[in-house]
Image (cartoon, grey):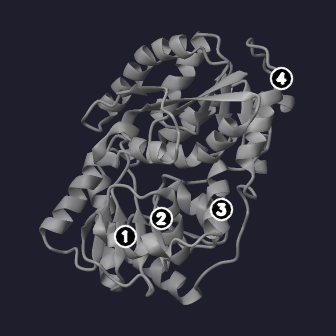
Amino acid sequence: MKKICVVVGSRANYSSIKSAMLAIREHKDLTLQLVVSASALLDRYGAVVKLIEQDGFEVSARLHMLIEGETPVTMAKSTGLGLMELPTIFDQLKPDVVLTVGDRFETMATTLAAAYMNIPIAHTMGGEVSGTIDESIRHAVTKFAHIHFPASQDAKERIIKLGERAENVHLVGCPRIDLVAQILKQDFSAPIKKLFETGVGDSFDLSKPFLLISQHPVTTEYGEGERQINATLRAAKEIGIPSIVLWPNSDAGSEDISRGIRKWREKKLDQNMHFFKNLPIDIYVTLMNKAACLIGNSSSGIREGAFIGTPVINVGSRQVARERGHNVIEVEHDHEAILGAIRQHLAHGRYKMDPIYGDGSAGIRIANILATSKVEIQKRITY
């Protein structure tokens, strides 16, 4: 049995790899090992580890590596702490392959630890362009990885241009789309009715138009987060439609956005708004499917939004240049621009499905490739 170790460090990590984890766990030739780390362990970010265990996954190891502060300094130190502790965990688990996700700082620590220990690395969602430090991490991980699982044709071609061997680059789609495809076939009306029993803020009728706001810090624009979230919240308030607002992730600048949200609520500007630390992926996707518009800078608007047909306003530079569908309007952090984009989407309504990032079967493809792939630990660049 080939042992595949997955490191999950955030709510985004989990939704981005869950379908592959399920497929690995069910594959007759594979054994799933799971390390949960960073913000996925913390209540202030929704304690994603509880959702993971509720979904029936057994956690092999827990790694507390997130240093409080959410600044560039603490993010760099958190990466270092992860790099110090992960080798011990890998030494105990002795995985045959480490499967790492995307572009976060936990991904960098995971990749470096596995590389120095001569453990083959498989990487999902590489080859994409987006801007910010995430893009630099993503391409760096590509150069360490032995097996590549890009989500789109454009990303596959870019990985090969970076010098990776074509036979090791497998276009599988995005595992998050697997979950979306399954969720859209199910009825989550019962948990949606109980949605406002958690979180804080006003309740409202979800059968009528509402906005979904998911905005995270831009690490290369550290210190601007409070101003940026204020522009979004102000536009949402002026349009006069109820809003569901998610708290930001744990990247540097998170506290700036959180402070902006807290001040907004303290000034009692939050009528018809409800705030959540975290939402289970099935509830989040159901809300995306119902929302009149998704506003912010989460990659979910680019990926899931295209597949679902959700009208999306991508605010600022966090997802700049990432391949997207016709459902996305790009605006700066200016409340008038955001307001105008909301009006444009409300007039248009929903968009047709655009399967840029896969057809809903990425997880099974990943598991099958991992079960049969053989790689040399010594990487060689092609020219």
Q: Where residue 209 is drawn, which disc sits there?
A: none
Residue with the mark numbered 2: 283
Q: CA distance from mark 1 to mark 3?
A: 20 Å
Can residue 161 be seen here? The reply is: no
- Residue drawn at point x = 23 percent, y = 79 percent: 271
Q: Which residue is mark 4?
A: 382
Image location (x, y in percent) of residue 212 = 43, 70
Residue type indicated by callout 3: Gln
Q: CA distance from mark 3 to mark 4?
A: 38 Å
CA gap between label 1 and label 2 equals: 9 Å
Q: Are marks 1 and 2 in contact (CB under 8 Å)?
A: yes
- Rate crowding at label 4 as few (under 14), some (14 to 19) or many (20 or more) other CA atoms within 10 Å: few
Quarter of the image with the C terminus in it: top right
**Disc 2/disc 3 C-alpha distance (Å):** 12 Å
| N-term mark: 4 or 2 | 2
Q: Earlier in the sequence, mark 3 or mark 4?
A: 3
Looking at the image, residue 301 sits to the left or right of residue 128; the answer is left
Label 1 vs 4, first from the N-terminus: 1
Q: CA distance from mark 4 to mark 2?
A: 44 Å
Q: CA distance from mark 1 to mark 4?
A: 51 Å
Q: Where is residue 214? Give x, y as percent.
A: 42, 61
Q: Which mark is residue 182?
A: 3
Relative vertical location of residue 154 with respect to residue 381 in this rendering, above or below: below
Amino acid type, callout 2: Ile
Q: Is residue 22 above or below residue 333?
A: above
Task: State the image coordinates of residue 167 (x, y, percent, origin top left).
Answer: 86, 30
Dot 3, crowdedness within 10 Å: few (<14), some or many (≥20)? few
Could you tell which of marks 1 and 2 lies nearer the N-terminus?
Answer: 1
- Residue at image position (68%, 36%) is 24
